Image (spheres, rainbow, N blue to C red):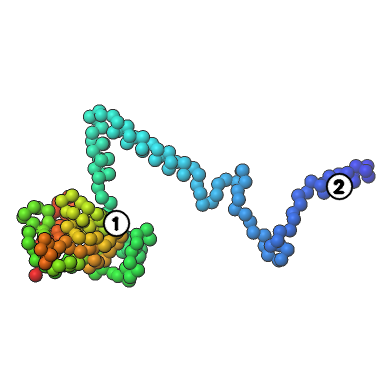
Amino acid sequence: MAKRRKMREHSSVRDKPLFWAQDEERYGFDRISSFEAGPDEGNHPLFNKELFVFKILGSVCLFLIIAILFKNENATFNQARNLVQSTMDKDFQFATVSNWYEKQFGKPLALLPFMENQDNKVADTDEPQYALPASGRIIEDFAKNGQGIVIETGKDATVQSLNEGIVRFAGVKEGFGKTVIIQHTDNTETWYGNLASIDVTLWTFIEKGTKLGLATSSSDGMKSSFNLAVKKGNDFIDPIQVIQFE
């Protein structure tokens, strides 16, 4: 019986788990728990596996549905196809969203390269306050082509932005030559065409009066000119309606 008792005591001691002192405990600190999950402990607290898989499956299903809509030429799906196409054709209003974000949270979106002094700027009104793009005179009015006006300036004059906004286009556009398009917070766009050079980059935020480029010199080299257009929605409007020329 004594022999059996010793065997049981030895077995109970052997089955007890051994807890080795960690480095933290040796120096008097509490043991730091690990976030590594075992096979039965679930997922990482910052990652939801089920939600992630659900989003992937939802994206795949949406892609397949749209692909079927455009592959199937059945007239029944015409309305759905038109809705998808019109949605994809619309320009995202970066300037409007960034302006809303700044008013709500006090600073612009971190994804957009805003100027540092924008944090201290508070708009007093939602109405656009336009500044003249360059000193000059109108040599071709809006009635000539229904898209914009032509402004004659001094030689190599600097063309500036009418108002703050996002550079939506910076390059060569058919009918306008070298062009810069600025998207403003009031859902309007200003187009500056026939430029000799472009000094801004795409998708950057610019302030009112920022240099966009230089006007193109005339054939005699004595004057320069550039095109100016204002677009609201899908229609061009006469710039004289929103800008006061002297």
Q: Residues within 10 Å of mark 1 (few under 14, many from 20)?
A: some
Assign the C terminus to one quadrant of the image.
Answer: bottom left
Assign the N terminus to one quadrant of the image.
Answer: top right
Residue 46 in view, yes or no: yes
Image: 16 above or below 109? above
Say what secondary structure mark 1 lies in: loop
Which amino acid does the dot numbered 1 rest on?
Leu
The residue sitting at the left extreme is 143
Say what secondary structure mark 2 lies in: helix
The image shows residue 10 at horizontal and vertical percentages of 86, 47
Which residue was labeled with disc 2?
9
Q: Which residue shows up at 26% across the image and 68% down it?
A: 123
Q: Which residue shows up at 20% across the image and 60% down it?
A: 196
Q: Which mark is residue 27?
A: none
Nearer the observer: mark 1 or 2; the answer is 1
The residue sitting at the right extreme is 2
